[in-house]
Image (cartoon, rainbow, N blue to C red):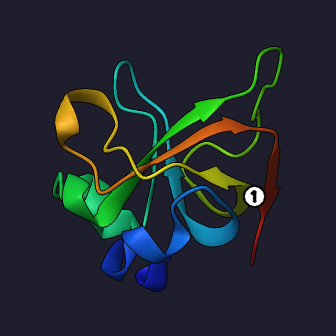
Amino acid sequence: MVQLLANPEKYDGKHVRVVGYLHFEPEANAIYLHREDVEHHLIRNGVWLSLADGVSFDGCQDAYVLIEDVYPRNTGAQSAWSGTITRATRCVKVP
């Protein structure tokens, strides 16, 4: 996640695997570096996340997870986040 936030151009259009803190809320689905980033609204430490059609991440809300998908380097809703992961299909909780 740190590498993705620090060097987004390096990962543009590539398949990525990141571990971070997943938080969904209306108009603000994202994976963050840390839980505290959500609590303090540090959205630059997060990547906007959208799910593939028909995919549900039940059980992954407000947890540290591993996400895999392609990383297009646009900046998500309102250009607030540091990037976007679109059409995510896999979420695995990590200890």
Please state the horizontal and vertical placement of residue 41, each as a whole percent of the image.
Answer: 17, 51
Q: Is residue 28 above or below residue 37?
A: above
Horizontal placement of 32 versus 1: left or right?
Answer: left
Q: Residue at x 31, y 44 (%)?
A: 75
Q: Residue at x 75, y 58 (%)?
A: 68
Among the 4 quarters of the image, the one containing residue 88: top right
Please state the horizontal and vertical placement of residue 79, each as a whole percent of the image.
Answer: 20, 39
Q: Is residue 41 above or below residue 10?
A: above
Q: Is residue 6 above or below residue 37?
A: below
Please state the horizontal and vertical placement of residue 77, each as a whole percent of the image.
Answer: 29, 29
Q: Residues within 10 Å of mark 1 (few under 14, many from 20)?
A: some
Q: Nearer the viewer, residue 84 or 64?
A: 84
The answer to whether residue 33 of the structure is visible from this angle is no
Q: Which residue is mark 1?
A: 68
Label 1 sits on a secondary structure element that is: strand
The C terminus, quarter of image = bottom right
The answer to whether residue 91 of the structure is visible from this angle is yes
Q: Residue at x 70, y 46 (%)?
A: 60
Please state the horizontal and vertical placement of residue 51, each as a whole percent of the image.
Answer: 67, 29
What type is the residue that disc 1 sits on? Glu
